Amino acid sequence: MPKSTLLAGLAASLMAFAPAHAGDSKAMLAAQAGLAAELIDRTLTKEGAANIMVSPASLAAALGLASLGFGAEVKGPETALDAMISEKPAAADAPLTTAVAIVFDDKLVLVPDALSMLAGHRIKPSIEDLDGPKSVEHINGWVKQATRGAIPVILDAPPGGGFVSLGALSFKAHWKNSFDKESPASPFQRPDGSTISVPMMHLAGDGQKFRFDEKFTAVDLAYAGESYSMVVLAARSGKGVGGADLKALTSWLQGEKFEAAKGEIFLPRFSLNDGRDLMPILNAMGVAPEKAKDAGFPGFTKENISLARVLQKTMIKVDENGTEAAAATAVITERSIDPKLVRVVADARFAFALRDTRTGLLLAAGLIGDPLLAGE
């Protein structure tokens, strides 16, 4: 895949966190909502999970930091990164905190300008053995701190490779208008058609903004201070909202065309811990880092490096008082094999042939499916 194609795909996700003054804010919001809808729909199709949560923002942060390694021709990601990195640390009780970091393997030879280029973005990289267990402890510790303890672990084993870029966020806020303290049980239909009884939060009044049509209805719930809100979108039919529906409802997810009205909201309490490797989904979407091996990361190193995994973990808890949410994404690279190097890896059933090179006689031939099995 040409570098330009890869970067075009990255741009769609990186627009999600670019500040409004950097360009057309509507286009940026549309890119963010479109990315979220696509990730959810493809994940639902692939896994069939009842609950799915993704974080376009932490994905944009981690990919944006990694894309600095593509070199000087990539300018878009810099805007997203600058928006993610505060000049001063956020207060401990701030509703939203964000962070980015990068860890280079101590065996990777960096180009002379790499560290100064990162310093220009107020990023101080770590350099350590990514094949060693201490790298797992360090990266998990960073994620735990960046998410205020909500996501304690993102790696289960040493990542290896050339570098790991990280993006994380933490959100904690109370509703502007709290739900009723009592949440009576109400029926809720699962995707498989079965019905369960759940505590259903209730809020009534004229302090919210709504949008609706013949198929869907939604509310844009404000948090205290009104700097943040949560769109809750429901189907009028009992079938619920599907992944494919979201692609047609991205303007709803952006909070467009909502109007103040008197209304009533019934919302279940819910909590979710989610996580997966997004690499296969990004490949299917056309954002295919694994095919960008020829592009490399000349802004960081002259070595042959490619993206290998895009790990993301998310959590959310919603109740009558407000919301706690967190997300972390780790973009993990690997040292690519020289395309001119031929590799033979007999890690599955293989064939052999024993030849007499002088006469051309084929002395023996066969297939080996279990090298440990001794024949009689």
Image: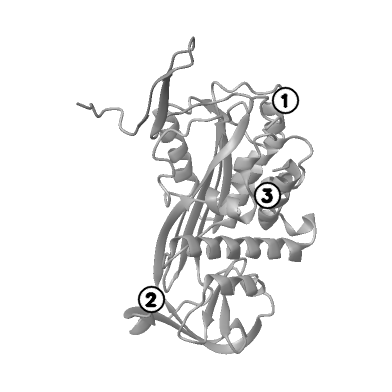
Q: Position of residue 89 (x, y in %)?
A: 58, 45
Residue at image location 44% in from the left, 17% down from the top: 361
Residue type at numbered disc 3: Leu
Q: Which residue is mark 3?
A: 10
Q: Are marks 1 and 2 in contact (CB under 8 Å)?
A: no
Q: Which mark is residue 113?
A: 1
User: Which one is closest to the eye, mark 1 or mark 2?
Assistant: 2
Q: Residue furthest top?
A: 358
Residue type at numbered disc 2: Asp
Instruction: Using the image, determine if residue 215 lies above or below residue 119.
Output: below
> Dot 2, crowdedness within 10 Å: few (<14), some or many (≥20)?
few
Q: Nearer the viewer, residue 20 or 339?
A: 339
Instruction: Please tell me in which quadrant of the rendered image residue 64 appears.
Output: top right
Under circle 3, the secondary element is: helix
Under circle 2, the secondary element is: loop
User: Which one is closest to the eye, mark 1 or mark 3?
Assistant: 3
- Identify the mark nearer the N-term, 1 or 2: 1
- Identify the mark nearer the N-term, 1 or 3: 3
Q: Which residue is mark 2?
A: 192
Residue at image location 58% in from the left, 69% down from the top: 229
Residue at image location 23% in from the left, 26% down from the top: 374
Left or right of 310, for residue 275:
left
Distance Cα–Cα, label 1 vs label 3: 23 Å
Residue at image location 43% in from the left, 39% down from the top: 141
Instruction: Using the image, determine if residue 107 lies above or below residue 212.
Output: above
